[in-house]
Image: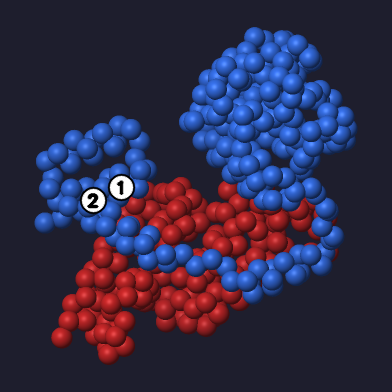
Amino acid sequence: MRCDFADSLLQGYFDGELSGCRAAEFERHLRHCAHCATELVDLDLLRDRLQLAQLYEPATAALRRKINAPLHAIAPTTAVSRPLVWHWLAAAAALLFVATLLWRVGHGVRGDDYQAELAGEIVDALVRSQQPGQMNVIASNNERVVEGWLDGRARFAVPVRDFTNDGFALKGGRVDVIEGHAVAVLVYERNGRPINVFIWPTRERDSPPRTGSWQSFRWVDWRKGKKEFCAVSDVDPADLEHLHQLINSSA
Amino acid sequence: MNDFDAEDRLRFEQLVLPHVDAAFNLARWLLRSRADAEDVAQEALLRSYRFFRGFHGGDARAWLLQIVRNTCYTWLEKNRPMELSMEFDEELHLQTCATPETLAIVGDDRKRLTMALETLPPRFREILVLRELEGCSYKEIAAITAIPIGTVMSSLSRARRQLHSALVNSLQGARP
């Protein structure tokens, strides 16, 4: 006999789509329902089979050519410098984080529409950051080059300093748009790991650093001289603090 | 299309083109043919390009897949209207699966899964493809398929049950 939960909560539970209390409700039910327990195992087996069979069929090369041809006929592609691969990876994770941070810090609680918008923004940022050659990036360890490059794009003055002597080598910079605002990003390298420093203008007063973590990333956020800085990385927290001090004393 | 400026085009390339794989995959499973999927996915992409100005941010993949899906259904209505009224029929399915051809390929799980998936009505097939192959959330599935989010759960349940029994049948059908 099928259980009443089989068509509703069971699926949501399996797909991780239930809210905390509904998931707890289902787990209470699960303790007494062998049917649902078996069904969960079956669903899991089915999913494994589907994954193993590799049924996903990516676009054929012919389709890609067909799509690209008419698009490229319309306007020439602007040449952009190609960044290192790790820039993208770090960018993706960091952008995701910053979008979340901005939402938390700047807006407090909003309705569903706003959250959907933010989710879109995060996805957009991720998509942008994962497109090699598609985003505005400069790879250079020269302060003036990076500063000059950002100057024309970020619409606000971005102080760029290389701290190679202190163990934080400048690797480059980029601009992005988060929640409709231009954000400048400086990328440093510490012991082979990237640190992204997001910078955007603010009207708020200077503030001491706040720190936190999000998944495996740590962040330090502070305001100085009408700018907000947010350094994000998976390096040692002490290193982030060190970089914060270097930037603050040079700004 | 000609007044599309470079900025729009760049935005389109950044937001929509990364989802070409998703577009093709959905079309391939809805149409059950790679060649048709290529044509229809191309049409859907050009359509989305033309109406890109109507896209005001949000989930670009869901937006594109919605267009792909609608283009697929329009294509099916025109070219294979019978398929849209297709209902899952276990008896019929059992017979289909017992043909010599199916007996020959039954050892290959990928082919068996493909066949089982293709016997499902399009509306169940698409929901499984979106969830299991594309990894869409219920919210995204609801947006793409234009069904209420509450219905996603029950549709998935039915779709999974049908797939499961199609697979069981294909095994039974294969036995002498």
Neighbour class for label 2 at 10 Å: few (<14), some, many (≥20)?
some
Labels 1 & 2 near each other (Cβ < 8 A): yes
Name the residue nearer the viewer: A69 or B146: A69
Q: Position of residue A93 (x, y in %)?
A: 57, 37
Q: Which residue is mark 1?
A: A14
Name the residue nearer the viewer: B91 or B151: B91
> Seen in the image, is A35 located left or right of residue A247?
left
Residue at the image position 23 percent from the left and 56 percent from the top: A42
Q: Amino acid at mark 2?
A: Leu
Q: Position of residue A106 (x, y in %)?
A: 62, 22
Give the secondary structure at mark 2.
helix
Mark 1 and mark 2: span between their CA atoms? 7 Å
Quarter of the picture containing the C terminus of chain A is top right
**Whether residue A86 is situated above or below residue A200 in the rendered picture:** below
User: Can the viewer see residue B120 in this picture?
Assistant: no
Neighbour class for label 1 at 10 Å: few (<14), some, many (≥20)?
some
Residue A221 occupies quadrant: top right
Give the secondary structure at mark 1.
helix
Q: Earlier in the sequence, mark 1 or mark 2?
A: 1
Q: Which residue is mark 2?
A: A40
Q: Amino acid at mark 1?
A: Phe
Q: Position of residue A126 (x, y in %)?
A: 61, 43
Q: How many numbered circles are shown?
A: 2
The chain identifier of the residue carrying mark 2 reads: A
The chain identifier of the residue carrying mark 1 reads: A
